[in-house]
Amino acid sequence: MRKFFRFEELGTNYKREIIGGLTTFLAMAYILVVNPLTLSLDSVPDLPDAMRMDAGAVFVATALAAAVGSLFMGIIARYPIALAPGMGLNAFFAYTVVLNYGIPWQTALTGVLFSGLIFILLTLSGIRETIINAIPAPLKYAVGAGIGLFITFIGFQNAGIVVDNPATLVGLGDFASPNTLLAIFGLVLTVILMVRKVNGGIFIGMIVTAIIGMIFSLVDLPSSIIGKIPDVSPTFGVAFDPIFHNFGSLMTMDFLVIVLTFLFVDFFDTAGTLVAVATQAGLMKENKLPRAGKALLADSLATVTGAIFGTSTTTSYIESSAGVAAGAKSGFAAVVTGLLFLLSLFFYPVLSVITSAVTAPALIIVGVLMVASLGLIEWNRFEIAVPAFLTVIAMPLGYSIATGIAIGFIFYPITMIVSGRWKEVHPIMYGLFVVFTLYFIFLK
């Protein structure tokens, strides 16, 4: 085991790897709570049950996808990077695809499955390098930041901090509302923990907020701590249903955009996370990432596995950096994290104490972390600033990640051509310009 994970070469040991794996799990365990609430559209009232995914089944799918994905990454690529259904992608799945587009969640799962399969093909063929190089860095940064703002906006909504206002579209909510006050308390607490660099700060903030909610009767007490694992059958294998029973539902422009969005965000989010965590762990060699192909393959296999279980796109988590900071350097840490996600399956009853007010601070803080990429954009170059800014702002205001990507990818070739720099635009970007222009033309 020590030889396989290269403990001596990396200067690590079992203790460091176990502590690192546990730290990573604590830093990202919030997804076990947030993902079921997001995909079941828990914060949206008066919806038909057919539009909501079963929260218990999604919990199991989330834990299994995270476990399998982390094990894949630890064993195949041997990196201390854990995986789970991604924040932002789950919001796109629930709020844009299902809620705004009205596309059944079963079809959305098929889109996740297709994106994972395409990702596998791109990884095995080497085309991934071409695609990564084709997308300009400013737009990559803008997409990540835009998703961060979108997630934060959803968090503010769930907390009741931002509400609908007929006069101004949005406005401040009722700060005298007990649930809003609970969410604000959770936000302040989580900010303090994060500023103090407490490992698992987001997770600890949620737990303390839930306890405070129970003390003041804002959150129901759990019936038990350990319980029966929920039934995963409501979501397991459902991704295949549209393929065999309603293939026509997949032959639409909306479905194409869904697949491309899942693919694009996962593709570049994974690449960014791999580079960031590997650099922090000192694993980069000559500015190149060893075994990058294996890492991307592990990520794409995890996405396919997650879609089959019944959850949105599974991706590499930047929270893995917390585990690296605690000493993790090898894939054994990711294996530890994966096993902890398996163990979490038995603690589903505890999730009854996690409400929208409890999870809202986590969404807001994750948004803060994601907008850090804005600092890498050259805002003094107007031809770059315009598509980047429109990408970022269109996501929360249009309530759609796909809309932000589409607008940015349309304006980028335009501004570059007008500025006389059309030769710097990769042909793939011109192709995407056509695709997204057609998307808006035929958008219902």
Image (cartoon, rainbow, N blue to C red):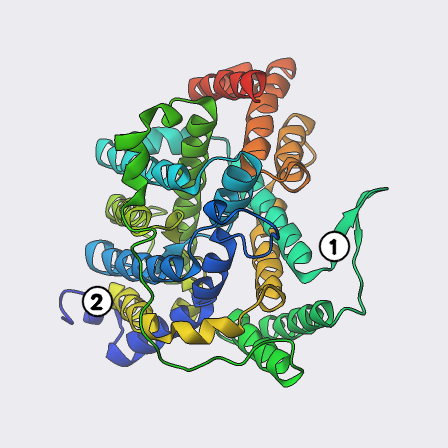
Residue 274 image position (x, y, % from top left) = 37, 51
- How far across and down, in percent of the image, does residue 252 sit? 43, 22
* First of labels 2, 1 by sequence position: 2
Q: What element does badge 2 sit on? A: helix
Residue at numbered disc 1: 162
Q: Residue furthest right?
A: 167
| Occupied quadrant, residue 67 | bottom left
Q: Is 144 on the left or on the right of 308, as rendered?
A: right
Disc number for residue 84: none
Q: Please name the residue that numbered disc 2 is placed on.
A: 9
Residue beneath the point at 57% across and 74% down: 205
> In the figure, is residue 3 to the left or right of 309?
left
Asked if residue 81 shows in the view, the reply is no
Disc count in the image?
2
Q: Is residue 160 visible?
A: yes
x, y percent for residue 41: 53, 52
Q: Quadrant of the N terminus?
A: bottom left
Frontmost residue, 243 versus 137? 243
Q: Is residue 221 above or below residue 419?
A: below
Instruction: Give the left or right position of residue 181, taking residue 343 as reference.
Output: right
Specify the amino acid type for callout 2: Glu
**In the rendered image of this protein, does residue 189 appear above or below residue 422?**
below
